[in-house]
Image: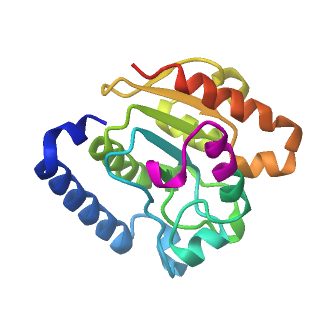
Amino acid sequence: SSEASDGYKGQDSNSDILEALSNKVRACQACTLHLNRQNTVFGYGPIEADWLFVGEAPGSEEYKHGLPFVGRAGQLLNAILFSIGLTRDNVYITNVLKCRPPGNRDPMGEEVIQCEPYLHGQIGRINPEIIVAMGRFAAQALLKSTASIAELRGQRHEYSELKIPLVVTYHPAYLLRAPLEKKKLWNDLQFAQTLFV
């Protein structure tokens, strides 16, 4: 991303800002999810990543390890990244929520609203070339939309006034339940590749 061209100093200050943001997340008490929190899941990947993947919330494996997408859905994501020539180590992966909702329930509106500033802070610092929103909650939070995945897929969206190209696709956890849909995620990422300037 453009930060990489600023040389070491720009990257360094951005990583300091992300570290400070991560510390804020650990201390956050903005919603009730902090009451039973043992861990937070901030994000994973290089700060100069061109690709940013956003899911909805950490699951039990992610919560345990403090890393996003390390369970079965993460393995599927790794395989799909590999199929388009990417690896986990050259993309940045995060979630809308940084704390795990109990019993892996869906994020609640208030939780999304309270957590969104952290996500927007991450995006502003990483300044990726493209964002991939995985699943309805990520898509709706990033696009400020109530449209369904079906309505949002297959087109170029833009994230905020930063005008970062954004593509909507299914969450890998959904594809574990509906394996015949995997090709759609692969198609969406191929489409995302065409949006690089």
On the question of residue 67 being in view, the answer is yes
Which span of residues is magenta-colored?
77-92
Task: Choose top left, top right, bottom left or bottom right for residue 6.
Answer: top left
Task: Choose top left, top right, bottom left or bottom right for residue 175.
Answer: top right
Left or right of 17? Residue 88 is: right
Residue 51 horizontal/vertical position (percent) = 45, 39
Left or right of 6? Residue 83 is: right
On the question of residue 148 being in view, the answer is no
Q: Nearer the viewer, residue 125 or 10?
A: 10
Residue 122 horizontal/vertical position (percent) = 34, 49
Q: Nearer the viewer, residue 40 or 131?
A: 131
- Residue at (39%, 64%) from the top-left corner? 30
- Residue at (60%, 59%) from the top-left corner? 69
Task: Choose top left, top right, bottom left or bottom right for residue 44.
Answer: bottom left
Query: Is residue 186 positioned above or below 82 on the image?
Result: above
Q: Quadrant of the C terminus?
A: top left
Query: Is residue 169 positioned above or below 111 on the image?
Result: above
Q: Nearer the viewer, residue 180 or 90?
A: 90
- Residue at (36%, 28%) from the top-left corner? 160
Residue at the extreme front: 85
Left or right of 136? Residue 194 is: left
Q: Quadrant of the N terminus?
A: top left
Residue 151 horizontal/vertical position (percent) = 68, 21
Query: Is residue 166 positioned above or below 74 on the image?
Result: above
- Residue at (55%, 26%) from the top-left corner? 192
Residue 67 part of the magenta-drawn span: no
According to the image, what is the colour scheme of the structure?
rainbow
Classified by dominant secondary structure, the portion drawn in magenta counts as helix
